Amino acid sequence: MNFTMTERDYRNASDDSEGRCVECGADAFGVEPDACNYDCEACGAAEVFGLEELLMMGKITIAS
Protein backbone atom coordinates (compact mmCIF):
# COMPACT_ATOMS: atom_id res chain seq x y z
CA MET A 1 0.00 0.00 0.00
CA ASN A 2 1.22 3.49 -0.87
CA PHE A 3 0.33 6.75 0.83
CA THR A 4 0.09 10.31 -0.47
CA MET A 5 0.56 13.19 1.95
CA THR A 6 1.20 16.90 1.76
CA GLU A 7 4.53 18.08 3.09
CA ARG A 8 2.74 19.74 6.01
CA ASP A 9 0.82 16.55 6.88
CA TYR A 10 4.02 14.52 6.63
CA ARG A 11 5.91 16.87 8.95
CA ASN A 12 3.07 16.98 11.49
CA ALA A 13 2.67 13.19 11.48
CA SER A 14 6.42 12.72 11.76
CA ASP A 15 6.62 15.15 14.68
CA ASP A 16 3.84 13.15 16.37
CA SER A 17 5.75 9.83 15.93
CA GLU A 18 3.18 8.31 13.61
CA GLY A 19 3.55 5.34 11.32
CA ARG A 20 1.35 3.47 8.88
CA CYS A 21 0.37 -0.12 8.29
CA VAL A 22 1.13 -1.15 4.71
CA GLU A 23 -1.34 -4.05 5.01
CA CYS A 24 -4.53 -2.18 5.98
CA GLY A 25 -3.52 1.49 5.83
CA ALA A 26 -4.23 2.20 9.51
CA ASP A 27 -2.42 4.97 11.36
CA ALA A 28 -0.10 3.88 14.15
CA PHE A 29 1.00 6.13 17.00
CA GLY A 30 4.13 6.19 19.15
CA VAL A 31 6.22 4.68 16.35
CA GLU A 32 9.92 5.42 15.87
CA PRO A 33 10.81 6.97 12.49
CA ASP A 34 12.80 3.88 11.46
CA ALA A 35 10.28 1.31 12.76
CA CYS A 36 9.92 -1.85 10.69
CA ASN A 37 7.37 -4.63 10.94
CA TYR A 38 5.64 -3.55 14.14
CA ASP A 39 2.30 -5.22 14.89
CA CYS A 40 -0.74 -3.30 13.67
CA GLU A 41 -3.41 -2.70 16.31
CA ALA A 42 -6.11 -2.59 13.61
CA CYS A 43 -5.43 -5.74 11.58
CA GLY A 44 -2.77 -7.61 13.57
CA ALA A 45 -0.28 -7.84 10.70
CA ALA A 46 3.38 -7.09 11.44
CA GLU A 47 3.36 -4.40 8.73
CA VAL A 48 3.64 -1.08 10.59
CA PHE A 49 6.52 1.15 9.54
CA GLY A 50 7.69 4.57 10.68
CA LEU A 51 7.05 7.45 8.28
CA GLU A 52 10.72 8.05 7.48
CA GLU A 53 11.18 4.36 6.74
CA LEU A 54 8.13 4.42 4.45
CA LEU A 55 9.48 7.47 2.65
CA MET A 56 12.81 5.73 2.02
CA MET A 57 10.94 2.64 0.82
CA GLY A 58 9.08 4.73 -1.75
CA LYS A 59 5.73 4.07 -0.04
CA ILE A 60 4.98 7.77 0.63
CA THR A 61 4.50 10.35 -2.09
CA ILE A 62 4.67 13.99 -1.08
CA ALA A 63 1.98 15.95 -2.93
CA SER A 64 2.08 19.69 -3.41
Image (cartoon, rainbow, N blue to C red):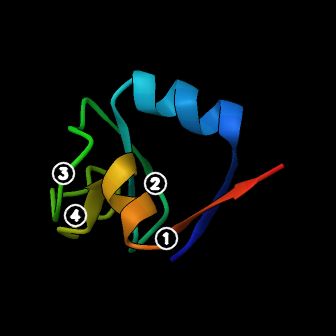
Disc 2/disc 3 C-alpha distance (Å): 15 Å
Image check: 48 left or right of 10? left
Q: Which residue is mark 2?
A: 26
The structure residue drawn at horizontal position 16% and vertical position 65%, both measured from the top left corner, is 37
Q: Is residue 49 above or below residue 47?
A: above
| Comes first in the chain, label 2 or label 3 | 2
Closer to the eye: label 1 or 2: 1
Q: Is residue 3 above or below residue 17?
A: below
Amino acid under disc 1:
Lys
The structure residue drawn at horizontal position 40% and vertical position 70%, both measured from the top left corner, is 22
Q: Which residue is mark 1?
A: 59
| Comes first in the chain, label 4 or label 3 | 3
Image check: 57 left or right of 2? left
Asked whether the residues under the numbered discs 3 and 1 touch, taking CB atoms below 8 Å apart as contact, a structural biologist would say no
Q: Which residue is mark 3?
A: 35
Of residues 57 and 38, the one nearer the viewer is: 57
Which percent across, then down, holds residue 54?
Answer: 39, 61
Asked whether the residues under the numbered discs 4 and 2 touch, taking CB atoms below 8 Å apart as contact, a structural biologist would say no
Amino acid under disc 2:
Ala
Disc 1/disc 2 C-alpha distance (Å): 14 Å
| Comes first in the chain, label 1 or label 2 | 2
Of residues 12 and 1, the one nearer the viewer is: 12
| Comes first in the chain, label 4 or label 1 | 4
| Comes first in the chain, label 3 or label 1 | 3
Amino acid under disc 3:
Ala
Disc 4/disc 1 C-alpha distance (Å): 20 Å
Q: Which residue is mark 4?
A: 44
Residue at disc 4, secondary structure: loop
Number of numbered discs overlaid on the protein picture: 4
Asked whether the residues under the numbered discs 4 and 3 touch, taking CB atoms below 8 Å apart as contact, a structural biologist would say no
